[in-house]
Amino acid sequence: MRSKAAPRTGVDWFLTFLRVLLSGLVLFGLVAFLWQQIDPGNPLASAINPDANRLSWDAFQGLVISGLSQGAMYGLIALGYSMVYGVLGFINFAHGEVFMVGAMTGMITSNKLFEAGVWEDNFLLAILITVLVSVICSTVTAVVTERIAYRPLRGSPRLIPLITSIGVSFFIQNTSAVLLGPGAKSYPRLPDWLRDDIGIGPFDIEGKKLLVLVVAGVSMGALWYLVERTKTGKAMRAVAEDKEIASLMGIDVDRTIVTTFAVGGAMAGVAGILWGILFGSVTEFTGFLPGIKAFSAAVVGGIGNLGGAMAGGLTLGSSESLAPQLVLEPLGVTGHTQLKDAVAFLVLIFVLLVKPTGLFGERLSAEDRA
């Protein structure tokens, strides 16, 4: 006998209304954009966006490349959130500051190499040294944080390490301000070939953005190989599935958790260097907003899902780059270029409304699934 479906509540109807509203606004904005591309003086544009103009191909490809390059950095940071959540079941909000440590370390190292003349004379060697030092510092920061702040709280209610991670985040921010001083710190000037456009098919990509995409892709590939093809990766997956069973099978759970934090810290260190290359400066607050967006990316892709974290980062970066111009501007929204942060979180809300487990599904431990 078929069971009766539960009656829809007022909350269900409200969520359905939000889904329809957001979907309708996006669809209407895209239709208005396409009509605007065909005829900037069409009646709809004249009514709600009198200053409408066509979006040129150069501008469009610039938005796409900018979104992908920034999204790649979100994805690298999101990997740390997903990995830690997979093994410990809590969100490490201090991970954004681990990313900031990588960016700050890269700033210090690159400026020292610039003063020594290495940055200009042998840029590839200089950037390799900078990446290595930044990855080491970010990894050490992540491991020390786990050992001092989180390991003593193992087994506590999840709210306790969550609050602790927020405190660690503020501690690292303020430590950076005390040691290095508040305000923005600049990276050295990049070589000309990284600031010139490189033609790849129909796209002209700025050298530094291409570097970001390539390094992010290589880093993601290396992480996939580590997790899927090595004994260390198998241990990480086993601990993420069930820590007690993994321990009974002879896996050192504490060492595996430390390794997870170290790998996540290394990915954040790489992202920090890419941030410095792309934007040229860093502050003690650099890790806050990218960290929150990276967490959003992990949720959008599916928390605990490493491929989903990277895909979520690319989705979020592309959305905040393209949506203001393709959806908000045709709707006549004032100051649409300043709303990219709002767009990123609207994407998170929309995905949670449509598919609460994320685009690629969650990967949770046996305890979380129970």
Image (cartoon, helix red, strand yellow):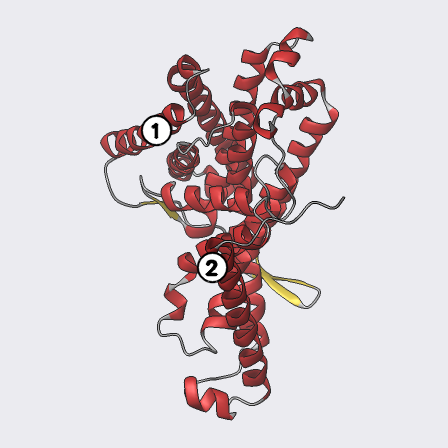
Q: Nearer the viewer, residue 283 or 285?
A: 285
Residue 195 visible? The answer is no
Label 2 secondary element = helix
Mark 1 crowdedness (10 Å alpha carbons): few <14, some 14-19, many ≥20: some
Against 7, residue 333 (above or below) is below
Q: Is residue 347 left or right of residue 93?
A: right
Q: Quadrant of the C terminus?
A: top right
Tag shown at residue 327? none
Mark 2 crowdedness (10 Å alpha carbons): few <14, some 14-19, many ≥20: few
Q: Residue furthest front?
A: 1
Q: Which residue is mark 1?
A: 163
Instruction: Report which quarter residue 206 is drawn in.
Output: bottom right
Q: Quadrant of the N terminus?
A: top right
In space, the residues marked 2 and 1 are separated at their CA atoms by 31 Å
Question: Where residue 225 sits: x, y (%)?
Answer: 71, 30
Question: Where residue 310 sits: x, y (%)?
Answer: 60, 44
Residue 338 visible? The answer is yes
Tag shown at residue 14? 2
Q: Nearer the viewer, residue 297 or 186?
A: 297
The three-letter amino acid code for the residue at tag 2 is Phe
Q: Is residue 32 left or right of residue 329?
A: right
Residue at image position (61%, 48%) is 311
Residue at image position (40%, 58%) is 342
Instruction: Report which quarter residue 31 is drawn in.
Output: bottom right
Label 1 secondary element = helix
Lower sequence index among marks 2 and 1: 2
Residue at image position (55%, 40%) is 76
Against 277, residue 305 (above or below) is above
Q: Nearer the viewer, residue 258 or 281?
A: 258
The three-letter amino acid code for the residue at tag 1 is Ile
Question: Where residue 6 sits: x, y (%)?
Answer: 59, 48
